[in-house]
């Protein structure tokens, strides 16, 4: 502290007229001509695949009540019949009774295991659908809470997978890093889903090529339908299993409904002759057999269904610009080694 404290002083504030005169006397600099560039639309936004209503309606349905009541009555009838059968065997001989009881116990255990598998399969599909919605919010809104939920959900979904052990370890190492929410989801996508995308591409190409070749040599149209249907169902199950689903019977039926709904919304089954000629080569279908043309169309449809299944089963949706295109897949499926494609393109078949 100083020895002589500062003495009190009075200050006179300028009135409004004085301030206005002072400002008028100052020289104003011209304002800079600032122009703002037009904001470009964000092409990295992702959308949840359209697969029908995500949540069950809360309305009361008499049809569901009727179906449930009939199922319960059928189950009670089956249990009563089995009990009476076992009792009749016990009346004839204790050995036959115990044998019938053991067989009935094995059948009951198998039924319970099947029911649990169906429930788990449906639950896994519901979990993937929930992850798609959470990941979409995390990417579009760039919110940390949704990003954390997405990463935790992916780690839970793929826990114990040997093929993703390295990716899970690397992702766990970045858990405490300061990363933007959107980038955190993209990091998990690159470490966990990029290898699965490559494997899904191989599955689709293999199934579609098999459909193309075998429907070409199949003599009957009915066999074509059976074979194409079996290959498409097997492809859906393989893709669902690859991305973490448990494709049991009811889960497979639900997945088929979701894929068909997505294709109907996206209009992905509309294939014209010009579209086919574009990727098979101009006039190529006219130079080869009609059977190969039919097989080529079946292969194209199988590839489109496979791409739709990837969009439905992938836990983190891709933006439209990053999705695999059907033309590139068609080049690999159908292009012939000796065929001359337009624009000097090379044939897409790979040597194995």
Image (tube, rainbow, N blue to C red):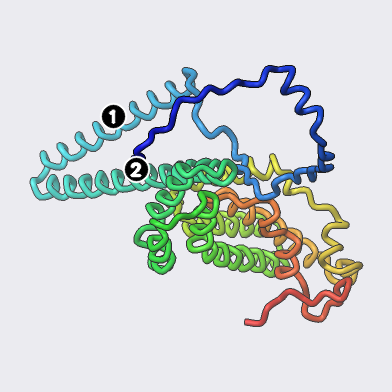
| Residue 219 % position (x, y) | 71, 65
Numbered disc total:
2
**49 displayed left or right of 279:** left
| Label 1: element kind | helix
Task: Please tell me which residue lies in front, 295 or 205.
Answer: 205
Please, is residue 350 above or below residue 298 in the view?
below
Quarter location, residue 206? bottom right
Residue 76's disc number:
1
Q: Residue at x 24, y 31 (%)?
A: 80
Give the left or right position of residue 230, taking residue 222 as reference.
left
| 219 vs 334, nearest the viewer | 334
| Position of the C terminus by quadrant | bottom right
Asked whether residue 250 is in view, the answer is no
* x and y, in percent, of residue 62 in the image: 47, 18
The residue indicated by pointer 2 is 115
Q: Which residue is at 66% across, 56% downward?
A: 323
């Amino acid at each position: 502290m100083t020895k002589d404290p500062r003495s009190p002083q009075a200050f006179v504030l300028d009135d409004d007229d004085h301030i206005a005169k002072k400002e008028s006397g100052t020289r104003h600099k011209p304002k800079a001509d600032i122009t703002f560039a037009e904001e470009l639309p964000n092409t990295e936004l992702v959308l949840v695949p359209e697969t029908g209503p995500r949540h069950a309606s809360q309305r009361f349905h008499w049809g569901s009540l009727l179906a449930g009541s009939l199922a319960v009555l059928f189950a009670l009838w089956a249990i009563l019949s089995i009990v009476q059968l076992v009792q009749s065997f016990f009346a004839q001989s204790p050995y036959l009774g115990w044998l019938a009881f053991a067989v009935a116990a094995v059948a009951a255990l198998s039924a319970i295991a099947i029911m649990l598998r169906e429930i788990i399969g449906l639950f896994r599909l519901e979990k993937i659908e929930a992850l798609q919605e959470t990941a979409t919010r995390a990417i579009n809104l760039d919110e940390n809470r949704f990003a954390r939920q997405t990463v935790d959900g992916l780690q839970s979904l793929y826990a114990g997978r040997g093929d993703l052990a390295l990716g899970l370890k690397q992702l766990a190492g970045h858990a405490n890093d300061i990363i933007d929410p959107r980038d955190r989801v993209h990091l998990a996508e690159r470490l966990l889903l990029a290898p699965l995308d490559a494997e899904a591409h191989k599955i689709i190409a293999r199934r579609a090529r098999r459909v193309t070749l075998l429907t070409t040599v199949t003599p009957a149209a009915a066999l074509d339908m059976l074979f194409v249907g079996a290959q498409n169902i097997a492809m859906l199950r393989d893709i669902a299993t690859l991305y973490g689903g448990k494709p049991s019977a009811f889960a497979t039926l639900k997945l088929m409904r979701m894929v068909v709904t997505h294709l109907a919304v996206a209009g992905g089954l509309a294939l014209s002759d010009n579209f086919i000629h574009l990727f098979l080569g101009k006039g190529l279908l006219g130079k080869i057999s009609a059977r190969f043309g039919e097989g080529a169309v079946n292969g194209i449809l199988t590839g489109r269904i496979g791409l739709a299944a990837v969009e439905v089963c992938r836990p983190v949706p891709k933006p439209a610009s990053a999705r695999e295109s059907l033309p590139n897949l068609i080049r690999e499926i159908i292009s012939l080694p000796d065929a001359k494609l337009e624009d000097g393109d090379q044939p897409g078949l790979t040597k194995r």
